Image (cartoon, grey):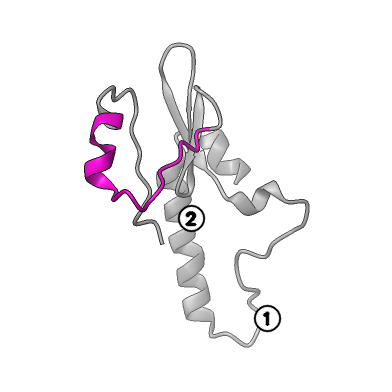
Amino acid sequence: QYIDDEFSIDNFYFQTYVDSIYTSELEIKDSAESESFVSYLDILLEMDIYCNLATKLYDKRDDFNFSIVNLSYLCCNIPSSPSYGVFVSQLIRYTRACSSNEQFLRR
């Protein structure tokens, strides 16, 4: 799913090598929202004026105005052991992706 995503920070030579990474049939797009933040895969990277990099989870589904169920309800017809495993693994992923406790708690 993510095989064609490239990420480069302050790499002045990136444009020089893009043609050797992608064939001419593929179009590469700069999807950065601004100079100070960009979403990459499921992480939002934000750089402050002192060049400190902060990370937090990004889910593009949050951009829409409706609620989404990310985890199964335990009352569903799903075995509880895998449900707990998914919950714990998501907590670990959130912990690793967020650079601050506040971002972890918001998620």
x, y percentage for residue 106? 62, 42
40 shown above or below 1: above
The secondary structure making up most of the magenta span is: loop
Q: Is residue 20 left or right of residue 86?
A: left
Report the number of discs. 2
| Residue 36 badge | none
Kindly report the distance in space between the C-alpha atoms of the residues bearing marks 1 and 2: 20 Å
Q: Is residue 51 left or right of residue 22?
A: right
Task: Name which residue type carries label 1.
Answer: Cys
Q: Quadrant of the N terminus?
A: bottom left
In the image, is residue 16 part of the stretch drawn in magenta?
A: yes
Label 1 vs 2, first from the N-terminus: 1
x, y percentage for residue 62? 66, 49
x, y percentage for residue 27? 41, 47
Q: Secondary structure at mark 2?
A: helix
Q: Is residue 12 left or right of residue 68?
A: left
x, y percentage for residue 10? 33, 22
Quick one: label 1, few (<14), some, or many (20+) residues within 10 Å? few
* Residue beneath disc 1: 75
* Residue beneath disc 2: 91
Which residue occupies 65% across, 74% down?
A: 73
Please report the bounds of the magenta region as a residue range: 15-32
The furthest residue to the top? 50
Q: Nearer the viewer, residue 72 or 16?
A: 16
In the image, is residue 70 part of the stretch drawn in magenta?
A: no
Q: Nearer the viewer, residue 105 or 13?
A: 13
Quick one: label 2, few (<14), some, or many (20+) residues within 10 Å? some
Q: Is residue 83 left or right of residue 61?
A: left
Task: Name which residue type carries label 2.
Answer: Leu
Q: Secondary structure at mark 1?
A: loop
